[in-house]
Amino acid sequence: MLLIDLTVNGLIIGLFYALMAIGLSLIFGILRIVNFAHGEFYMIGAYAYTLIALFFGISPWLTLPCAFIAGMALGWATERLLMRPLYSGYASWGVMKDEYAVIITFALSLLLINLVDKVIGPNGYRGPSLVATTRVEIGPFMASGHRLMAAGIALLVLIAVGLFVRYSYWGRQIQAVAQNRLGASLAGIDTAKASSIVFALSGGLAALAGALLSPIINATPDVGAFPAVKSYVIVVLGGMGSIPGAAVASLILGVLESFGAVYISYGYRDTFGLVILILVLLFRPHGLFGERSREV
């Protein structure tokens, strides 16, 4: 019974991790950069969901799309205003691509954290639950009603994203740009628009994760820091730029953390992912699903 309970809880946690990590993996697949402001997309979603629901009295089911749209808007603005120099011919700046990406996304992270801290305040806000049922018991498994509902939403969204990237018109173009940006542009694909879509989608997914977890983890200015670290670990573990790898690594990490917290120590729960990451990098540096050609 305990094994089933730990496995299911670990998979639920993994679904939330996947919402964050897949967006980060998409950005790396398109631009080959790591977005250090990714955690702040999560934070914006948590605040958008919580504050709109609490101060305007809107149903949580209506504020979820608002949080997703807020994250998409921030992602689109980030790409449009800050990321375009990476591929729009600003070589005369004399700044290398990786250096520029690190500096600008890290600066954006600090800006958003301090802006929210000054405008809204450092106090935490807890979001409203999606369901009134506090506990749900399914056979030997027991969990909160909100967590189960949020996990179901996360699963549906992840399936929708996978279908979008795999089969849609823009999804195929995103795949082409990820494989070869120059070749895609020569084939007539609007690579700038593909990058905008990826950044917007990444921001929306991270914001949705923040909204779904806000009834569990209070929205604070620095709430996105820890989920962002988890995302970085998962992206490297699954393989840089690999969406299936990020999804599988998220579920694996969630289950391992769930078992490790019980059988080893809850206090070391957040270190298990780092230990696994070190082992994977030692024996398979390109990650579980990564390609050797992507090694840097």
Image: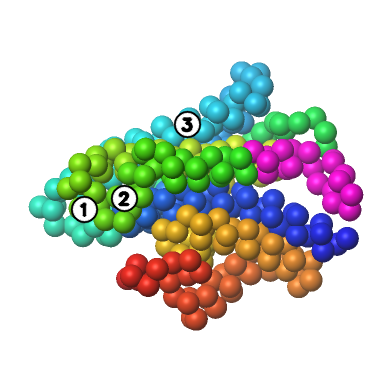
Residue farthest along the front direction in this orientation: 167
Residue farthest along the left direction in this orientation: 92
* Residue 140 within the magenta-colored segment of the rendering: yes
Q: Distance between the residues labelled 1 and 3?
A: 33 Å
Q: How far apart are marks 2 and 1 (CA)?
A: 8 Å
Residue that label 3 marks = 70
Residue 251 x/y as whole percent: 63, 58
Q: Which range is magenta?
A: 135-153
Mark 2 vs mark 3: in front: 2
Q: How crowded is mark 2: few (under 14 residues within 10 Å), some or many (20 or more)?
A: many
Numbered circle sitting on residue 128 = none
User: Upstream in the sequence, badge 1 or badge 3?
Assistant: 3
Displayed quadrant of residue 14: bottom right
Residue in the foreground of this view, choosing between 89 and 115: 89
- Give the amino acid at mark 1: Gly
Do the numbered discs 2 and 1 sit on residues whose CB atoms are within 8 Å? yes
Residue that label 2 marks = 176
Residue 71 x/y as whole percent: 47, 36
SS class of the residue under badge 3? helix
Q: Which residue is drawn at 59% across and 30% down?
A: 64
Residue that label 1 marks = 183
